[in-house]
């Protein structure tokens, strides 16, 4: 059932010790947002979620002295997206993210970073002082023109993509988006990702995941999917439990009778044509994205 009480993060057996970094006092969630865009009552639309009791670090991008933090956000973004050719130009960061929107994520006191993280992010000892913070992740959301108060998830990345498994902050990508959606009181969010990206697994766990486009030639990468999620915090904990039999989804949705093959362009185009013929709405099942390989065909669902 939607709108059930969310599961407490640290009671989640499956995630267990792997989330211990969340309790490190040297790591805090941050918001990098101009004063006019600050959220008035953070988290008030998602009561009952106790995942982010931390003191939030606030940084103002309009202050010149914060350029170092901005440089580090962009440095992380460039490294994470460079290999896929989608690194964000600096002016896009300012014009399309900072001015209209909101950047959130987790940051760590620079003087407490592990050598592996310093190396991955290219942080040197120069000018490091006790008040210095380094972003470990970023999630950018921008309000859309939709009258329903819809936001668009513009960018998500984490330092994990640059680290060996044993050096990673388990769940930091997922939790960065969770924090941003919670903090900014986002009820509805659309976004874009590529079909075989690991990010599909994350994005499909914030609420029922509707596919808006399955093949998107207007994007630089046609094999992009566009999605919409009605944010439901009661879904979130199932991300940390691959064995989850959480099937409230199946009480509301049934297999639509076809699959989509993320590696087959014909399959994506055929799905896109169904969407254009208004045969949907169609959904993916978040738990299925975790259980299958990134390139496996996925079941498409429709409302019961
Ligand atoms: C995609 C991205 C944001 C995921 O964030 P993350 O911090 O690595 O992921 P989290 O720690 O929050 O979650 C871990 C889970 O995500 C999935 N996942 C993350 N990276 C994965 C990968 N390379 N392959 C398969 N699954 C992956 C797995 O389910 C994993 O759980 P597991 O380790 O128990 O299998 C991050 O890898 C990244 O920044 N990638 C480069 C930029 C990018 O492609 N962003 C997405 C744009 S839409």
Image (cartoon, rainbow, N blue to C red):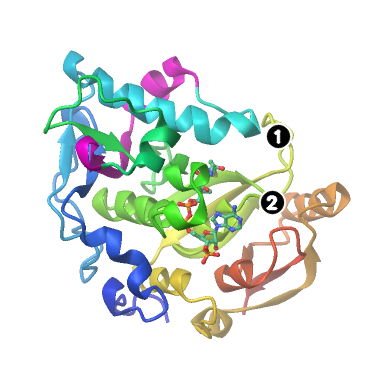
Disc number for residue 44: none
Nearer to me, 161 or 278: 161
Identify the residue at image location x=15%, y=53%.
25
Farthest residue, direction right: 266
How many other residues sit within 10 Å of disc 1, few (<14), some (14-19) or many (≥20)? few
For label 1, the SS is loop
Q: CA distance from mark 2 to mark 1?
A: 12 Å
Q: Are marks 2 and 1 in contact (CB under 8 Å)?
A: no
Residue 28: image location, x then y, percent: 21, 48
Is 81 drawn above or below residue 171 in the view shown?
above
Instruction: Tell me what residue is drawn at x 25 percent, y 65 percent.
Output: 51
Residue in front for this viewpoint, 128 or 78: 128
Q: Where residue 125 sits in the image (x, y, percent)?
A: 26, 25
Residue 135 point in image, percent of width and height: 31, 37
Q: Which mark is residue 221?
A: 1
Q: Dot 2, how many residues are within 10 Å of its Cα: few (below 14), some (14-19), or many (20+)?
A: some
- For residue 45, what is the image quadrant? bottom left
The secondary structure type at the circle numbered 2 is loop
Left or right: residue 41 compared with residue 236: left
- Whether 74 is drawn above or below 205: the answer is above
Where are the magenta residues, as a range? 89-112
Kindly identify which residue carries mark 2: 196
Q: Residue at x 32, y 49 (%)?
A: 180
How many numbered markers are drawn?
2
Q: Can you see residue 231?
A: yes
Beta carbon of the mark 2 residue lies under 8 A of ligand 1: no
């Amino acid at each position: 059932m939607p709108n059930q009480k969310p599961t407490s993060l640290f009671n989640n057996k499956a995630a267990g010790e792997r989330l211990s970094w969340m309790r490190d006092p040297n790591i805090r969630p941050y918001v990098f947002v101009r004063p006019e865009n600050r959220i008035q009552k953070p988290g008030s639309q998602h009561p009952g979620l106790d995942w982010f009791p931390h003191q939030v670090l606030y940084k103002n991008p309009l202050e010149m002295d914060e350029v170092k933090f901005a440089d580090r956000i962009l440095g992380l973004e460039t490294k994470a997206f460079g290999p896929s050719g989608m690194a964000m130009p600096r002016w896009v960061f300012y014009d399309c993210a900072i001015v209209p929107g909101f950047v959130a994520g987790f940051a760590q006191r620079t003087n407490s970073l592990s050598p592996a993280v310093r190396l991955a992010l290219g942080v040197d000892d120069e000018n490091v002082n006790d008040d210095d913070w380094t972003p470990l992740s970023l999630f950018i959301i921008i309000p859309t023109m939709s009258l329903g108060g819809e936001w668009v998830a513009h960018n998500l990345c984490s330092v994990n993509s640059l680290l060996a498994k044993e050096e990673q902050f388990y769940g930091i990508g997922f939790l960065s988006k969770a924090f941003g959606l919670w903090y900014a009181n986002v009820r509805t969010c659309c976004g874009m990702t590529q079909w075989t990206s690991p990010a599909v697994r994350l994005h499909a766990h914030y609420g029922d995941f509707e596919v808006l486009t399955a093949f998107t030639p207007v994007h630089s990468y046609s094999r992009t999917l566009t999605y919409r999620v009605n944010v439901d915090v009661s879904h979130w904990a199932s991300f940390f439990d691959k064995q989850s039999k959480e099937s409230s989804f199946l009480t509301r949705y049934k297999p639509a009778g076809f699959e989509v093959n993320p590696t087959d362009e014909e399959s994506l185009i055929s799905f896109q044509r169904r969407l254009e013929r208004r045969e949907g709405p169609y959904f993916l099942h978040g738990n299925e994205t975790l259980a299958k390989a990134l390139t496996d065909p996925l079941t498409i669902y429709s409302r019961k």
